[in-house]
């Protein structure tokens, strides 16, 4: 009797377990009886899981981006369509007959300050030679690191007011020579030539005609290719009503021009500023 009861109990347990494993029955009024849970169709081609990753130089959708890197040094000139040089006037210039060392701010077209330029020269050279004095111009960026150094040699001959071909060297730290800017040998036009560090002609700079060595306060120079056929930019001096002063402007036809070439044109602009817009060749004719 006990053995039969145990067999019935075992059968009932199997029956209950089989019922619990059965698929639930779902009732829908529009389609009748559904005996299985709806499942999405099985695809034969397995798709990889999409994992959101971010790598340097790429976005999540695979398009290239430029990572943010703080620019410094001569790289501040990258992608700049124009640069503008503004002189900072010292109070001592109005109180003394001897010019002080000049200070400038080099700005982008948007007004952002790219470099701060400061002249280094001796008092005797400023007193005797005026704007033809030799000097070194140090350009520092916002991080107070020197980005460019311009060296100008003596720009007069053995006698006062006897001008010879003037030149300027453009350097980047820690002592890399980018090239030269030299005055052209012409008595009627204000021409310059831009040379590489190997003395190869890179560009010509052609200015207006001048028989006296002086130019109007607003003048323009064309930057040309070595064959004089293509104009690559312009150096102009014009009145800026926003700051109520004259500024020296350098415009590039190609804003993606190599930053080293832009640095050479910047050096040429400083040489033009001293030669034609800073005064005479000695203290007796200095403005």
Image (cartoon, rainbow, N blue to C red):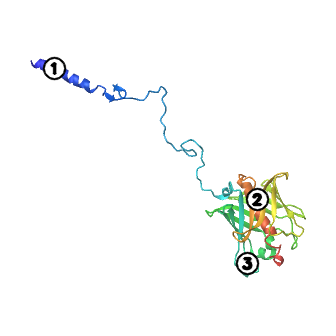
For marks 2 and 3, give the CA distance. Answer: 28 Å
Near-viewer residue (97 or 77): 77
Tell me the quarter of the image containing the N terminus.
top left
10 Å neighbourhood of mark 1: few (<14), some, or many (≥20)? few
Q: Position of residue 147 (x, y in %)?
A: 67, 60
Quarter of the image holding residue 189?
Answer: bottom right
Picture residue at 89% right of the left edge, 62% below the top: 186
Q: Which residue is mark 3?
A: 93
Picture residue at 66% right of the left edge, 56% below the top: 75
Return the mark for residue 8.
1
Earlier in the chain: of badge 3 and badge 1, it is: 1
Near-viewer residue (215 or 150): 215
For marks 1 and 2, give the CA distance. Answer: 105 Å
Report the side of 188 relative to 82 (left or right): right
For marks 3 and 1, give the CA distance. Answer: 119 Å
Disc 3 is placed on an element classified as helix
Labels 1, 2: front one: 1
10 Å neighbourhood of mark 3: few (<14), some, or many (≥20)? few
Q: Which residue is mark 2?
A: 265
Q: Position of residue 169 (x, y in %)?
A: 77, 61
Earlier in the chain: of badge 2 and badge 3, it is: 3
Residue ranking furthest to the front: 30
Tell me the quarter of the image containing the C terminus.
bottom right
Report the side of 211 relative to 139 (left or right): right
């Amino acid at each position: 009797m006990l053995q039969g009861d145990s067999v019935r109990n075992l059968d009932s347990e199997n029956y209950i377990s089989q019922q619990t494993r059965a698929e639930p029955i779902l009732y829908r009024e529009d389609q009748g009886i559904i005996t299985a849970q709806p499942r999405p169709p099985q695809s034969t081609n397995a798709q990889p899981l999409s994992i959101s990753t971010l790598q340097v130089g790429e976005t999540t959708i695979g398009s290239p981006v430029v990572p943010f890197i703080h620019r410094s040094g001569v790289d501040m000139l990258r992608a700049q369509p124009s640069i503008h040089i503004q002189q900072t006037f010292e109070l001592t210039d109005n109180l003394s007959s001897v010019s002080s060392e000049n200070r400038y701010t080099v700005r982008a077209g948007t007004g952002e300050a790219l470099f701060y330029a400061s002249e280094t020269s001796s008092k005797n050279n400023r007193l005797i030679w005026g704007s033809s004095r030799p000097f070194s111009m140090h350009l520092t960026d916002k991080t107070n690191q020197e980005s460019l150094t311009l060296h100008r040699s003596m720009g007069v001959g053995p006698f006062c007011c006897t001008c010879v071909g003037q030149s300027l060297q453009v350097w980047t730290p820690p002592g890399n020579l980018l090239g030269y800017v030299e005055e052209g040998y012409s008595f009627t036009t204000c021409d310059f030539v831009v040379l590489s560090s190997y003395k190869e002609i890179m560009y010509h700079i052609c200015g207006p005609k001048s028989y006296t060595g002086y130019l109007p306060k607003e003048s323009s120079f064309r930057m040309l290719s070595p064959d004089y056929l293509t104009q690559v930019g312009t150096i102009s001096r014009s009145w800026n009503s926003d700051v109520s002063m004259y500024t020296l402007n350098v415009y590039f036809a190609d804003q993606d021009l190599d930053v080293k070439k832009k640095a050479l044109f910047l050096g040429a602009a400083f040489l033009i500023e001293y030669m034609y817009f800073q005064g005479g060749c000695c203290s007796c004719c200095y403005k």
